[in-house]
Image: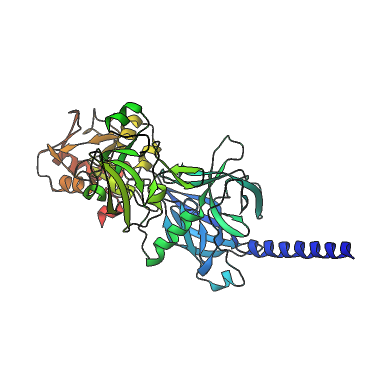
Amino acid sequence: MKIIITLLLSTLLLCANTHNEDITKQAIVKIYNVAKKPNYLSPWTSAMQSSSGSGSIIEGGYILTNAHVVANQAFLEVQRYGERKRYIAKVFAVSHQADLALLKVEDKAFSEGVIPLTFGTLPEVEQKIVVYGYPMGGSTLSATIGVVSRVEHHVYAHSGETFLAVQVDAAVNPGNSGGPALSDGKIVGVVMQVITKSQNIGYLVPVSMVQHFIEDMKDGHYDGFAELGIGTQKLENPAMRRYYGLDDNVSGKLIDKIVFKSSMKAVLKEGDILTAIDGHNIENDGTVAFRNHEFTDYNYYVDKHQIGEEIVLDIIRDKKPMRVKGTLKNRADDVFLVKTTEYDRMPTYYIYGGYIFSPLTRNLIRSTNRNRLRMSCLASKWQETEQDEVVVLLKVLASDISRGDNNFGMWAIDTINGKPFKNFKEFYEMMEKSKEKYIVLEDKDGVKVIIDREEALGKQDELLKKYNIEYDRSEDLRK
């Protein structure tokens, strides 16, 4: 009798698990994206590109996926597990910072009968997970099983910013992006990226980042993840520690820079020792404990806040400990001279007599190897003055008025007729309003490009027609 009961219970559990798995699969979707991919070297052109990814239906009928799955989208369709019909979808919200997006389907038939997936908690190392999605190698739903290998800060390839990530050993391939990683039937992460030429090393956007993004979007506006706007240095060197009068019981990071636009300027000074955030001790290598025996970058406790919230910082100033409070107001784009990677928009450009100008973006730097060292150096700089954008002479269209200048490309401009400018918009307005006979463009080393204004304007239409360019400026400038 005991054997019969045991077999019966085993059968019931197997049926229950099969039923639960089937319910879970109903919430997994395949996403089809036809994207308008900009050409940053010829910014008036673009190309259509088709791709696919994965997603999951969550509360409210929203589809949770990666931002890179729907980036630059021109037309989106989604398809539920076990169905052949595709539904038109639209992007409801997107965080290119955290590589997350929410989609919405207007047709209510799409989500009928679906039990949305719910969120779990940040997974533990060695915790088992199941990754669902539609990777390459087939057209039906794929499920792979693995465990969590580590949890720590990692660079998000889509944005280039660093946030908490979950490393897993489950097989993750192109097409898996945006699919959920489940543990006990709940979402603990969203598949984000893999390390190529590795043995099953994949990364998830952790559930904590997902919940931060959803909470941020509740007011209908995306604020993003906060940036303190400070530069710090490790305090592991014994001589440095003695110099600042730190004993073995004190750990933290030296603040060696307060960025020009940082909201922390009001409460921090260069030379302060940052010892704790919201009461969480910072180690000398810049890490914090977020769980017992687990450490990650100290920005973990910054990322837990929404922009506009108050943060508590423990510091040592002039060898005296104190506690200060500041309001988080900045994102990375507010403090860096070159903005983070952009999506969902065509690049800005301006043509003047065959000379093509553009703001320097990370997208542009990625598009060419020309002058890469100099451009990458600029991209690593914080804003230090009122100037908040770099303008480059992208390239020069060959003509009789530009002879000798055709070798200029990806050339950073500092002044127009001796006058500096704040950003591309101000540069554009100065060019448009100039009445000087010659426009003199100069870089910080004194190298010049000189344009005869009347000659350039006289040749403009002819050059545009010759190079088959419809407009001499991007749509945002035409508005």
Residue 236 position in % (x across, y down):
38, 31
The structure residue drawn at horizontal position 59% and vertical position 60%, both measured from the top left corner, is 186
Q: How is the image coloured?
A: rainbow
User: In the depicted view, which residue is nearer to us: 162 or 422?
Assistant: 162
Left or right, 366 with reference to 137: left
The structure residue drawn at horizontal position 37% and vertical position 59%, both measured from the top left corner, is 222
Residue 166 position in % (x across, y down):
53, 47
User: In the depicted view, which residue is nearer to us: 173 or 44?
Assistant: 173
Kindly indicate the quadrant of the structure image that contains residue 338.
top left
Residue 142 position in % (x across, y down):
66, 52
Residue 256 position in % (x across, y down):
27, 37
Q: Quadrant of the C terminus?
A: bottom left
Left or right, 68 with reference to 479: right
Instruction: Specify the farthest residue to the left.
Output: 436
The structure residue drawn at horizontal position 58% and vertical position 34%, both measured from the top left corner, is 197
Left or right, 167 with reference to 22: left
